[in-house]
Amino acid sequence: MAKPIPRTSSRRNGRISSRKNARRIPKGVIHVQASFNNTIVTVTDVRGRVISWSSAGTCGFKGTRRGTPFAAQTAAGNAIRTVADQGMQRAEVMIKGPGLGRDAALRAIRRSGILLSFIRDVTPMPHNGCRPP
Amino acid sequence: MAASSLSSFLSSLLLPKRPSPPLVDILCLLSQPHLRQTPSKRASLLATWGPSAPPSSFSSLHNATDISPILFPSLAYSSTLFFKSAYNVQIIVNDNEPEEKLLNRFRKEVLKAGVLLEAKRRRFFENKHEKKKRKAREAARKNRKRRPLPKAPKDIKHLANKERRGDEKDDNWDVPDVDLPYC
């Protein structure tokens, strides 16, 4: 969803979670998972805790249209809009997976005005591991 | 580690011979003038014995790429060690880089690393036959790029023509002056 995920109450024992919903984070990481059928854009902080996410499916696209570059563009735009309000200026981009959404999401991120420090491709590569289907 | 022990062993061998002038020349050849660190004898000794090429990432390391595998042998594995997560390709974004240029740079790096090809290949299982076919295709493509088929040189054709004419000249077309029994 294009809104921050609410914290569950499972951590009430030891930790006092921060009360305010919007954490001020100047720097974050944008993960883009671009598969053949869909594109998911997740914005996390530097440690990896998710702030907000958006995907082509949640943007209203259905079926084969989710895998298109335009859908990836809207998903990225959606995800960044919520985060820009929280004051994120710099971000790293981690792109995973083959798919048409790679370039389109990167373009949308670039156009949104966030400063990019790194762009990394983190597609997981097995060293001849599991047998594919 | 093995590298340091080997280098120390070799340096201990060379030291008593006082090789300073030729080693300095080798160092000047090897190192860039603006390189900050130059370990004195290791660079020349490890020049022939170094790990494989540094990773395709780190597009901003211009200065030390020549002897960085010698100076920092573990740099080749930086993509797995550094940044807490392994990456295939990394691009460091310069300030005010135009969007298209950035995208093109990213695409080129990804193409060089072969990420998309690899992902497509691992999507479905390929048995022995398919693997062999794919490898043959890739080898053919590589050979085609490296060595375009040379055409047959023209000299051979000329020679063949001349030889033919020569043969014709040497052929004996005259009728022998002999009484033929059956004419």
Image (cartoon, grey):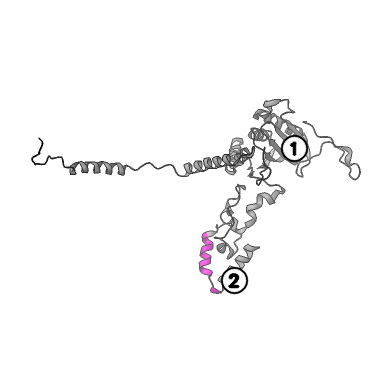
What is the crowding at mark 2: few (fewer than 14 residues within 10 Å), some, or many (at least 20)?
few
Amino acid on which disc 2 is placed = Ser
Is residue A65 shown above or below B183?
A: above
User: Residue B179, image x and y in percent?
Assistant: 8, 40
Circle number at residue A43: 1
Query: Which picture quadrant has residue B39?
Result: bottom right
User: Residue B76, image x and y in percent?
Assistant: 62, 53
Please indicate whether residue B151 sits to the left or right of residue B38 in the image.
left
Could you tell me which chain the residue with mark 2 belongs to?
B
Residue A71 versus residue A45: which sits nearer the camera?
Answer: A71
Amino acid on which disc 1 is placed = Val
Magenta-colored segment: predominant secondary structure:
helix
Residue B88 versus residue B21: which sits nearer the camera?
Answer: B88
Instruction: Look at the numbered discs 2 and 1 and tell me whether their residues touch, using CB distance below 8 Å.
Output: no
B23 magenta-colored? yes
Residue B67 versus residue B36: which sits nearer the camera?
Answer: B67
Q: Give the range drawn in magenta.
A: B16-29
Task: Name the residue: 18% across, 44% down.
Answer: B170
Query: Which picture quadrant has residue B167?
Result: top left
Is residue A94 shown above or below B47?
A: above
B67 magenta-colored? no
- The reply to whether label 2 and label 1 mark residues of one chain is no
Q: Name the residue under label 2.
A: B12
| Circle 1: element type | strand
Task: Name the residue: 40% across, 43% down.
Answer: B150
Residue B22 versus residue B117: which sits nearer the camera?
Answer: B117
Is residue A110 shown above or below B79?
A: above
Please indicate whether residue B110 sits to the left or right of residue B21 in the image.
right
| Circle 2: element type | helix
Task: Name the residue: 78% across, 39% down.
Answer: A50
Q: In which quarter of the image is the N terminus of chain B?
A: bottom right
User: Residue B30, image x and y in percent?
Assistant: 53, 59
